[in-house]
Image: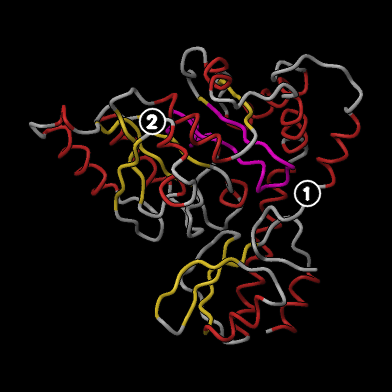
Amino acid sequence: MITFENDYSCGAHPKVLERLIETNLIPQPGYGFDCFSERAREKIRAACGCPEAEIYFLSGGTQTNAVVLASLLKPWEGVIAAQTGHIHVHEAGAPEALGAKVLALPEHAGKLDPGELRLLAATLLADENVEHMVYPGAVYISHPTEWGTLYSRAELEEISAICREFGMRLYLDGARLAYGLAARDTDVDLPLLASLCDAFYIGGTKCGALCGEAVVFPRQAPAHFVNFIKKHGALMAKGRLCGVQFDALFTDGLYWEIGRQGVEQAEALKKLLAKHGVPCFMDTPTNQQFAILENGRYQALRKKVPLSFWSNPDPAHTVVRFATAWYTTDEYLEELDKLL
């Protein structure tokens, strides 16, 4: 069976799974205080060029976004995000359930516009009725975005500067960060994110791990963050599960290898779609490719290969997401070629 439905349809990368098996019978403390988690933290600090970073492991992206945002925000504050932002559209209101009201701005190929961000923050804080409103306390972005697009170094620097100007925290969702870091012509890397963000996470679930995300606070985590994680039901007793996996992902460049594999197969997929006269909705440099299919062709294709519905640009067409990953082989593409 082949699939392009998402980038987590298979289990773990074989090297990650091997490491889990190798360490399985080695007793260790719980709750992330094990030697594997600490070794993973040291490797992530080195990769980020940030020796003082505080790093915590949580099990999934929605859980991570909700818990981290709740810890960053004061009770009277909300978080600014693009209308297509994952926390605004695809997390069932989880961040808002923990008190992080989402303040949505228009999206531009999935991204926030710095000028619109500054205007919203300035307008809200200058409003004479601001005490009756939600203060802008943080900015949420994802890299890649929901549309597989990427921020440039200049865009991130401008957004970070706006956050400093208005006393907001900058939080970056890195669920698919491996594919963003591997994209051609990107000028964004982990040290840059560590220098600009108040918090970000390095995605594991969609980048070769069975589960798990590594939350990075480049300078200082909120006080008693472990206590805060547990209070929200997110502290794993067997914290080693995530630590072992990230130790493997950050050994011998595996995380970057996984990213490159996904991006290279996405480029091959893009050429395959063009060969069959299937246009892309927009140009994306990462592992998510968005194709425009006639509705009949979409319905016929989805019966043979799992795909993700994205939107209907008009009554006759459907935008479909094809996602590649570390497990997307040449055989996957050959089979899709036949189906198209």
Which secondary structure, mark 1? Answer: loop
Does residue 210 lie above or below 134 as drawn? below
Q: Which amino acid type is shown beneath numbered disc 1?
A: Gly
| Residue that mark 2 sits on | 99
Specify the quadrant that holds the C terminus.
bottom right
Question: Which mark is drawn over residue 141?
Answer: none
Which residue does the image show at 54% across and 74% down from the upper left? 291
Q: Marks 1 and 2, how far apart in space?
A: 33 Å
Q: Which amino acid type is shown beneath numbered disc 2?
A: Gly
> Which quadrant holds residue 230?
top right
* Residue 275 pos. (x, y %): 63, 85
Q: Is 271 placed left or right of 88 in the picture?
A: right
Residue nearest the viewer, comparing 77 with 45:
77
Which residue does the image show at 60% across and 80% down from the upper left? 299
| Residue that mark 1 sits on | 11
Residue nearest the viewer, comparing 72 with 19:
72
Q: Is 127 placed left or right of 11 in the picture?
A: left
Stretch of the chain drawn in magenta: 191-216
